[in-house]
Every structure is written in C-alpha cells, then in structure tokens.
Image (tube, rainbow, N blue to C red):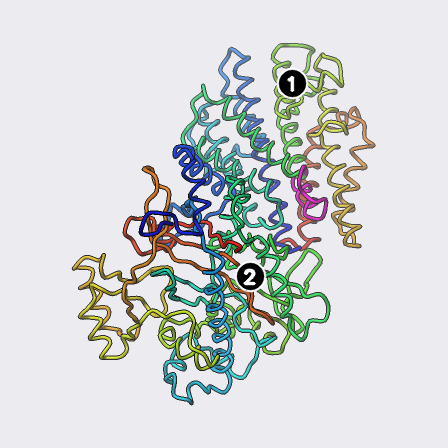
C-alpha cells in the first residue's frame, strides 16, 4: 500500500485517507462480522484429511488489494496473450503437433504425460475452445514486475470467493464504493453462462441447456459449485444424475430424462467417464466421451486441457507463447529447473535452501518444499524423494513477493499475496477486472493456499 | 428439476417439520410432569410412542427415566428422529439442494443448524430446557418464514410443502393414536383432573390448547379434541388441513406437468373422506382403527409421490 517514502501508493490514496479516519476497534469488530456473514452463508471448504472439521472458513481480510487501471491493462494484455497461446497449443498438441516437430518441446514430455489424453487426438471441441475458464496465478515482485506462477487451465476454483468477498465488502463498507471507482465483478455468473451457452455443440438445436457437474456434497469446493449453478440459474448435477441415452447426455428429472447441451464440469478428467478413463470412477458418466466426440455435448473445460498447465510444461511457456502468437510474452515466467534433467537436478540438490520444489502434478500446496523456511531435516528428507523420482519435480527460486497490508490486532501488517484473475474464453477472451487475492496470513510465509492457512481479500481494479 | 433435488426438498422439509414437532412433544411432556404430583415416567413412555421411537429407546437404555427420555428425544444421534438428528438431516438435504433454495431460506436453515449444534452439544440442564425448546421453535419458524416470504411458487415450492404436510399429518395422527384411549367415551367419565391433564397435553403437543378455546367451549371434550385435530380445516395441524394442502400442491404439479399419478387419486380420496365423515361416525367405528388406516394411507401416498415424480437420492 505504501511507497518507500511512507506515502500511500497512488491507487491506495483514497482508501488510505478513509482508513486513517477509522477507529481500529471498529474495524476489528467488522472483521468478526465478516466471519459471521461467511459462516451463516455457508461459504466453507473442506480440508482433506481433517476428519472432524469437515467444513472450514477461509479467513477473510477486510483491507482490499487495489490495482490501478493502468496496472490492470498491462496485466490483462499479458493474460489474454497467454490464454490465446494455451488454446492454440492444445489444438496443436491434439492435431498436427507442429510445436514438437519444430523441436521446441520434447515429444516424450507430451506423450508420456498423464495429462495428455489420446482420446482427444484429432477432435476439435465446439468453437475450437479448449479452456473455457482459466485462472492465471500471478505474483508481483516489483512495481512493474508480474510473474505467472501457474496457468490453471483445468478447473480453476475460487471464483465464488471473489464474488462473496466483494459482496461482503459492499455490505460492510458501502461508503468505500462511493469514494473509489471500483470496476464491477458481479456480472461474472452472467458472463459465464453466456460464454458457455455460446459454445453449445452442433447437435444442440434449441436454447442450450447448461449444467454444472460436481463430484458432490463432500467435495472441498462443493459450496462453489452450488453457488455458481445458483447464480447462473442452471442445474447442479452429479454423475449419478446423468445417463447417456439416445446419443445424448440426459439428466433424471421429475418429468423423466432431459438432455443437457453444455456441461461445466468440476470433476477431473480421470473421473469423467469410467468407460474411457478410470473404470472405478463413481463420479462420472459412462459413455459421455462418445457423446462428446459425436458433437452432442460441450464439456468445459475440454478433457485433456491439463497438458497445458502441467508444471513440467510450465517451464516451456515462454517458447509456447512465442510460437503461437509470434511475440515475446508480456508476462514473465518464473525461472524453472526441471529436475528430470541431470544438470538441473544437481543444481537443485545443491541449492535446496534457496528453492521452492513442487510436484509436477501437485496442487493445493501439498507435497511441496519451501527451502528457506524448511528445517535441515525436512530438506534432507525431501532430497531423498527428489533423487528417487526426479522427473516428478520442478524447482523455482523463491521470489521476493510484494506484500499488501492486512488487518491484525495491532493495526496493519504486511503479508505476501498472489492474484488469480478469472478468464472466460468463447469467441472472445474476457478477463474479469479483479480476481481472487490470496494472502499468506502467517508472518513471513509465502504459502497462500487455503489448505495451508492462507486467507483471501477483495481485489479492486480502479477505473482510471 | 432433478428427481434427486425434488427428493432432497421433500425430505428437507419433512425433517424440519419433524424437528419442530419433536420440540413440541417434549414441551408437552415437560408441561405434564409439572402439573402432576405423582411419578411421571409413564408420561414419557407416551411421548416416546408419539415420536415413534419407543422400541429404539429400549435398545439403547435399560430403564425409562424422564431425563434419559428427554435426552433421547432431543439430541441422541442414535435416534434418527431426535431433534438434533432431524436438524442435521434437514440441513444436509438443504445443502444438497442449495441451488433450489433462496439465500434467505438456506441461511435460516444453516443458522438453525449452527445454533442448535452449539446448544445441544451437551446434555441440557432442566433449568435451560424452556430456552432450548423455544430456540428450536424459533429457528424452525424462521426457516418457514424465510421460505414463505421469498420462494417462488413453483414446483420447488410444491415439493417442499408436500414434504411438510405429509410429515405433519403423520405426526398429528400418531399423537392422537397414542392417546386415543383417553378420548374414548368409556374412560372419560367426565372431568377428572387426570383426564383434563391428558387432554390438554394432546392439544399442547400440537400447539392448539389456546386455539381450542376459540373454536369450541372452554371445556375440554374428547369428541371436540378429536374433531379439532382430525376434521377441522382451519386448524393448521389437523389432518384435514394437511390434506387440503397436499391435494392443492399436487394439483398445481398436475397442471404444470400435464399429468396425474396414483398419488393424486390417493390424496383426493383421503381428503374427501376427511371432509365427509363426522367425528361421531369416526369415534363409533373406532378411533384407533381409523388412525391406523390413515397413517398407512399417508405412508402409501409418500411412496406414490416418490414413484410418480421419480425421486431418487
């Protein structure tokens, strides 16, 4: 929020003035109020492995993170470029594979990757769109330095928090929204529905019927699935609600079976169709892949998009962006060591105390090592795992992430954050001005994942 | 609408209704033990029977004590019909059908669960009992209020209402059936204080002890009590009222769907018999037999709705 000379940074100036006039105890009371709002709304998530605490709240910090219109434009251009490249890459990988033939990406990296689905080879989804919804994770290290951490092209979550955080802020501090010109994010569900419906399959003749597919009430993001279905005004379905009948995917309604045209699925590829993928999946719909390939349903995001946001592919993103857009990437990639390469592995093992090591297929901050904060013992144990399966890991330097203020009992204190803006792709790319700011609540911590004690805050993009 | 959603709504409202009725039954039981000097364990036997959990209680407890009976009815998870089990199951169903509910209805349900989970976490001390019972009634009342004030009058509304009234009809019929013998003419040798307590307890179990005075004489008479709870179409917990509502909600569904099921016949027949038979006629032919048959028809109707509208879970 502040410049080095302790004056507030420009986008924060109006907010800072307001903050200075507030009574701290009142703000702390407001924090409690926010928590109550979240609890009664049922905005919860499940932490796997915690038996008795099946529903948890994500801590909410009430100081907004503020981004100027100028900063946002730069970011948005970079994200758009990246998302266009991701889709072009996917189309290429499942068709001519020119990027492999051009020698920019090793063949085995694609074809030996679990996220690559042979079932998608030669098939082009409706509208040629593979990743309908993308959540690009971004961190900032300096005034104009933005890095992309992850592309999240499969089923990015967290958008309900973006919406609820804004809703809560407007409820608690309406005056702030009179004083600051904050760009709206509330129309996201509407844009999402429009965007999904515009990519209905060729077999859909009438008004497209959209549904959200959830793994069910015990999934950690169930609240979000229900929330999105509700806000879009579409049906929330589980695999057991759906059948393949007469070449269509149909749901069991009180009137009998009715067809679905567009399925926004929040179920992983593996579980989507037990006939094509994991035969033990109880979450999926047997035969849906045949309906998909016959052009009778749109699946968003398309199966097999995971190959584009895989952590092993990540290190090639600069090449990928340049290959398909013909231009240098606008957003930077974090330098990445691929531990599958002996040289890199050696370097990583020698510099473990400086690096963050991640599993190639991991997510949610599980199974990673943050070198600088790990104990000697933890590093030694991790080194053994690394040597055992080097191909399973990548390593990155710890960036000096920017901080933003959060409210603590003594006033405000700096904490590290990242940002996940949400992107909708149809015949156009729409980036919602804002996103989910995740904040590492522990002093000095760099891990922002909600499963690891992270919190969230409202994210404002200002009109110029 | 998904058959699973319709099923979830139907059961959500059955459970909420059952939770509220459970609180009322306990309330009536407590009241009875206050107004009587002799030992009251037998009264709790009647309450357990009305709640349909007498046998289950014996599986868990060796002895019948009022303290154990209250705890069993209020918060024992081993009792699927305890108030807490019902609130939990109602909220679980609500969470599953979240998209079919307005935000207000969901929040009222969720808050009910949050508060009751807290206040029923430990055995309730007798001194705190009135407050807890009140809280249950208030919380379930808020759910009903939010539901009525905000829900669109469509199939979602209809399935929810049908759940409420099937459950309520079952409850009222059970309460009457457990106590039917105190309403029989032979027993009611006018006006013993013992009978009065029993009669009043029946009315209290359905929160109708005040309304009774407005409709009939102040004096409690078995035939009037039975009439009030069975045939009076203005009494919101009577069998006749429940069936007016069930038939009308099923009627909406039939018009909207353009099709009728076996459930429609059953509901209309039951309503017709409730309207046409006088209470004397029912008493003459046997109150117990009548109620038994009613309960079994009511169950059958629930099954026919489940089949006709393709419920599943």
The percent coordinates of residue A428 (x first, y second) are: 59, 70
Q: Nearer the viewer, mark 2 or mark 1?
A: 2
Which residue is depicted at the point 58% across and 26% down? Answer: B24
- Provide the residue designation for mark 1: B199
Q: Is residue B162 magenta?
A: yes
Q: Which residues are magenta?
A: B149-165
Residue at mark 1: chain: B
SS for dot 1: helix
- Left or right of A332, for residue A154: right
* Whether residue B65 is situated above or below residue A402 in the rendered picture: above
Query: Which residue is at a point 33% across and 60% down the rendered structure image?
Result: A366
Give the prevailing secondary structure in the magenta stretch: helix
Q: Is residue A347 left or right of residue B227?
A: left
* Distance between mark 2 and mark 1 Cα atoms: 53 Å
Mark 1 is surrounded, within 10 Å at the Cα level, by few (under 14), some (14 to 19) or many (20 or more) other residues, namely some
Q: Quadrant of residue A359?
A: bottom left
Residue A112 on the magenta span: no
Q: What is the x, y in percent for residue A179?
A: 52, 44
Chain letter for mark 2, please.
Answer: A
Identify the residue position indicated by label 2 in the image: A213
User: Looking at the image, can residue A217 be seen?
Assistant: no
Image spot of residue A363 (x, y percent): 38, 63
């Amino acid at each position: 929020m502040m410049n080095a000379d302790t004056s507030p940074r420009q986008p924060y100036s109006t907010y800072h003035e307001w903050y200075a006039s507030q009574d701290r105890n009142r703000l702390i009371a407001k924090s409690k109020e926010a928590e109550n709002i979240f609890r009664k709304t049922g905005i919860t998530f499940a932490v796997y492995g915690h038996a008795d605490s099946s529903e948890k709240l994500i801590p909410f910090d009430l100081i907004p993170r503020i981004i100027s219109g100028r900063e946002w434009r730069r970011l948005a251009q970079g994200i758009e470029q990246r998302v266009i490249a991701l889709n072009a890459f996917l189309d290429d990988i499942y068709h001519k594979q020119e990027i492999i033939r051009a020698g920019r990406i090793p063949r085995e990296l694609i074809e030996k990757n679990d996220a690559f689905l042979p079932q998608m080879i030669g098939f082009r989804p409706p509208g040629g769109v593979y990743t309908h919804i993308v959540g690009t994770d971004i961190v900032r290290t300096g005034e104009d330095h933005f890095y992309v951490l992850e592309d999240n092209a499969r089923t990015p979550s967290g958008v309900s928090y973006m919406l609820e955080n804004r809703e809560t802020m407007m409820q608690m501090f309406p005056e702030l929204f009179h004083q600051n010109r904050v760009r709206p994010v509330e129309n996201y569900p509407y844009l999402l529905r429009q965007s999904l419906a515009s990519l209905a399959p060729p077999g859909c003749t009438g008004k497209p019927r959209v549904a959200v597919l959830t793994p069910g009430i015990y999934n950690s993001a169930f609240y979000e699935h229900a929330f999105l279905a509700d806000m879009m005004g579409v049906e929330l379905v589980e695999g057991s609600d759906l059948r393949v009948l007469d070449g269509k995917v149909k749901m069991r309604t009180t009137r009998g079976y009715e067809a679905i045209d567009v399925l926004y699925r929040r179920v992983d590829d593996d579980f989507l169709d037990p006939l094509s993928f994991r035969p033990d999946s109880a979450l999926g719909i047997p035969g849906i892949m045949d309906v998909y390939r016959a052009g009778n349903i749109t699946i968003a995001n398309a199966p097999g998009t995971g190959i584009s946001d895989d952590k092993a592919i990540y290190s090639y993103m600069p090449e990928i962006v340049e290959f398909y857009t013909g231009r240098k990437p606008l957003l930077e990639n974090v330098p990445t060591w691929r531990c599958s390469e002996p040289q890199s592995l050696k370097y990583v093992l020698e510099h473990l105390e400086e690096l963050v090591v991640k599993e190639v297929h991991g997510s949610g901050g599980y199974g990673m090592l943050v070198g600088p904060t790990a104990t000697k013992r933890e590093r030694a144990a991790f080194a053994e795992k690394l040597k055992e399966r080097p191909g399973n890991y990548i390593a990155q330097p710890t960036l000096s992430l920017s901080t933003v203020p959060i409210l603590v009992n003594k006033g405000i204190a700096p904490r590290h954050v990242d940002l996940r803006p949400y992107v909708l792709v149809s015949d156009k790319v729409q980036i919602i001005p804002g996103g989910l700011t995740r904040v590492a609540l522990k002093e000095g911590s760099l891990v922002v994942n909600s499963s690891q004690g992270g919190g969230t805050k409202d994210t404002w993009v200002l009109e110029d | 609408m998904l058959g699973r959603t319709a099923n979830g709504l139907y059961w959500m409202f059955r459970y909420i209704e059952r939770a509220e009725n459970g609180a009322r039954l306990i309330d009536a039981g407590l009241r009875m033990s206050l107004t009587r000097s002799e030992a009251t364990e037998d009264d709790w036997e009647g309450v357990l029977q009305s709640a349909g959990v007498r046998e289950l209680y014996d599986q868990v407890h060796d002895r019948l004590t009022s303290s154990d009976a209250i705890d069993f009815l209020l918060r024992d998870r081993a009792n699927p019909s305890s108030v807490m089990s019902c609130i939990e199951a109602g909220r679980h169903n609500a969470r599953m059908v979240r998209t079919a509910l307005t935000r207000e209805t969901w929040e009222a349900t969720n808050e009910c669960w949050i508060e009751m989970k807290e206040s029923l976490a430990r055995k309730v001390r007798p001194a705190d009992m009135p407050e807890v019972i009140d809280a249950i009634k208030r919380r379930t009342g808020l759910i009903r209020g939010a539901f009525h004030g905000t829900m669109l009058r469509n199939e979602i509304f209809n399935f929810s209402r049908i759940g409420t009234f099937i459950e309520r009809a079952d409850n009222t019929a059970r309460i009457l059936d457990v106590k039917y013998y105190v309403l029989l003419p032979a027993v009611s040798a006018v006006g013993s204080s013992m009978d009065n307590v029993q009669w009043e307890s029946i009315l209290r179990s359905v929160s109708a002890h005040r309304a009774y005075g407005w409709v009939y004489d102040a004096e409690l008479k078995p035939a009037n009590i039975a009439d009030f709870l069975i045939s009076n179409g203005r009494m919101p917990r009577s069998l006749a009222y429940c069936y007016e509502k069930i038939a009308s909600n099923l009627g909406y569904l039939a018009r909207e769907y353009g099709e009728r099921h076996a459930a429609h016949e059953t509901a209309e027949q039951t309503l017709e018999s409730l309207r046409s038979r006088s209470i004397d006629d029912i008493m003459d032919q046997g109150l117990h037999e009548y109620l038994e048959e009613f309960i079994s028809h009511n169950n059958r109707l629930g099954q026919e709705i489940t089949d006709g509208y393709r419920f599943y879970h």
